Amino acid sequence: QVQLVESGGGSVQVGGSLRLSCVVSGLTHSSYCMGWFRQTPGKGREGVAVIDSDGSTSYADSVKGRFTISRDNAKNTLYLQMNILKPEDTAMYYCVADLSHCASSSPTAYKYWGQGTQVTVSS
């Protein structure tokens, strides 16, 4: 069974950094899209960043220049390095994966989801 397990969430102050990790099991091949979505109270899940199997990336405008998505295919692990964190980054962050190449920012396009890890940024 496919399983995605996030870790690395926590509480930080404005301007701080966190690195989220997501370990994927059940997908022996690395030719799939992986990414991060986040959900804030009263809102739906919005795309943060995605990375394809060839290393190409795409970011939401709100995080460009501050967040970096990467993947280690040998470890089947996805990362999100978050720098210069802001209060508006506070959300539940979800790791996602899909068998196709990255082509959509819609959460419905991603078949596999983790349980989420909470990120809280205080000022």
Image: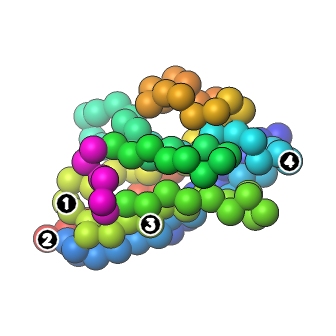
Between the residue at mark 4 and the residue at mark 1, the CA separation in whole angstroms equals: 37 Å
Residue 63 or residue 1, whichever sits in front: 63
Q: Which residue is mark 2?
A: 123
N-terminal label among 3 and 4: 4
Between the residue at mark 3 and the residue at mark 1, the CA separation in whole angstroms equals: 16 Å
Q: Which residue is mark 1?
A: 87
Residue 65, horizontal then vertical, whole percent: 30, 60
Pointers 2 and 1 in contact (CB under 8 A)?
A: yes
Q: Which residue is mark 3?
A: 81
Give the residue type at disc 1: Pro
N-terminal label among 4 and 1: 4
N-terminal label among 2 and 3: 3
Between the residue at mark 2 and the residue at mark 3, the CA separation in whole angstroms equals: 20 Å
Asked if residue 64 is among those painted magenta in the image, a careful observer would answer yes
Q: Residue furthest left?
A: 123
Mark 1 is surrounded, within 10 Å at the Cα level, by few (under 14), some (14 to 19) or many (20 or more) other residues, namely some
Pointers 3 and 1 in contact (CB under 8 A)?
A: no
Residue 110, horizontal then vertical, whole percent: 58, 30
Between the residue at mark 3 and the residue at mark 4, the CA separation in whole angstroms equals: 24 Å
Give the residue type at disc 3: Gln
Q: Secondary structure at mark 3?
A: strand
Q: Magenta stretch?
A: 61-66
Apparent side of residue 74 relative to residue 40 in the rendered image (left or right): right
Residue 117 or residue 55, whichever sits in front: 55
The C terminus lies in which quarter of the figure? Answer: bottom left
